Image (cartoon, rainbow, N blue to C red):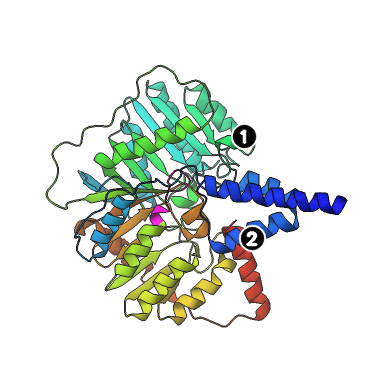
Amino acid sequence: MLVLGHFVFVLICLLIYAINTHVGGQRRHPSAAIAWVLLIALLPYIGLPFYLFFGSRKFVRPPRHPGAVTQGYDDTPRAAAIATLQGMGLAAPQPQRAVRFHADGQAAWNELVAVIGSAQSQLDICTYVLANDEVGQCVVRLLQERAGAGVRVRLLLDAVGSLRTSRRQIERLRAAGVEVRWFMPLLHNPMRGRVNLRNHRKLAIADGKQLWSGGRNLAAEYFMGDGRTPPWIDLSFTVHGPLVGEALDLFESHWRHTSGPQENSRQKTAPEPAGPAPGPGQHLAQMVPSGPDQAEDTVHALLLTAIYRARQRVVAVTPYFVPDDNLLTALRLAAQRGVRVELIVPARSNHRLADIARQRALRDLATAGAQVRLTAGMTHAKAIVVDDTLALCGSLNLDARSLFLNFELMVAFYAAEDIAAVDHWIAANFRGARRYVARAASLWRDILEGLVRWLGFQI
């Protein structure tokens, strides 16, 4: 009787998994789906609660009707990228009034301080990490000053990323009038999201007129280092134009999603009108959010489209490289057909598990003829250039967690001036990176790499 009851319970657990996956549109990589089924079937009393707590990765179901389809576009990565994103329902690219990429940490810090200081009515900041160090303390002081000047200041922190944020800092901010909320705390209503779906987006928006974004968190290592080691190499940017309004809409959606004090009745700041458009193609850019609030895996689809259309080169900078099989195949095939594929990663990142999990993909890519280069210091930048028609910059790493689980934000730049700026930044920062040499792994090493990749980056 006990055996029969256990068997019935296993069937019920698997039925719950199947119904939830179908109804919620939870499309998963086959290996991740197999992992969940095995976990639930073999350890149902652990597997089902674990799945209900961590298993969902999408809040939005795919639409029943496809988005707008562009007819007759040319065969360049740029045109294919725009058509792909349009087909997934994202806003079309628009010309921006100004785009500035930050050459280094000091330039990024100066821009961030300027954006914060420019806010006259409303300042909105979203970050994964707010550290209790010199940078974090300075940001707290700046936000206190803006709140003291009558500016409505809202700060959204990821509950896991900012787990070590000083609660004294938070108390000081709230005492000064800053509204602070935590995105998906570890203990929260499971109907409002899953613990493993983290908000990795970085935004600072002043009065709906200026946007500061990119890959940098609010911690010393991203700007000036800690005095003993140099700052991490990262890339961020400032935008003036219609993109700011789209970023503000994203922030508002996150703010509504979090639990917190009742909204006050103060009027929210409306984004500044775009004003006269620049010349054709100048600073043409498109916001590409990715994550549980998007029905499709937008950045993943964009990367596949652009890489398969690439004719000359694909250059990618990322701190962690644990791609799914489809993305790795696209890169390998591009290299094999003569496209110059160049991948730049740190020789040793700040996450040991990511370094173990990436080895199989690095070997496969190098064997296919791609150039893999290793930087001496920590590189945290996320930048991709395809031919001379598309550049991507933002918060998304080339690993399965960023591609399929986290809330991420990339911006696609289509103007020649902006693509050249990203290209120049990559050349200036990684000229001395050494070449990776692929070496065969032992059987036990290969098993270890596969387990780390499966457990750490797909479930």
Look at mark 2 in the image and give the residue it sits on: 35
Q: Residue furthest right?
A: 1
Instruction: Give the amino acid at mark 2.
Output: Ala
**Residue lying at 35% horizontally and 43% vertically, measured from the top left:** 212
Q: Which of marks 2 and 1 precedes in the sequence?
A: 2
Position of residue 135 measured from the top left corner of the image (x, y, whole percent) = 47, 42
Q: Residue furthest top?
A: 265
| Circle 2 residues within 10 Å: few <14, some 14–19, many ≥20 | some
| Circle 1 residues within 10 Å: few <14, some 14–19, many ≥20 | some
Look at mark 1 in the image and give the residue it sits on: 188
What secondary structure is marked by label 2? helix
Instruction: Give the amino acid at mark 1.
Output: His
Horizontal side, residue 254 vs residue 423: left or right: right
Badge count: 2
Q: Which mark is residue 277?
A: none
Horizontal side, residue 251 vs residue 283: left or right: right
Q: Quadrant of residue 381?
A: bottom left
CB of mark 1 within 8 Å of CB of mark 2? no
Q: Nearer the viewer, residue 421 or 200?
A: 200
Residue 315 makes an appearance in the image: yes
Residue 114 makes an appearance in the image: no
The magenta segment: 291-299
Horizontal side, residue 310 vs residue 301: left or right: left
Taken as a whole, is the magenta stretch helix, strand or loop? Answer: loop
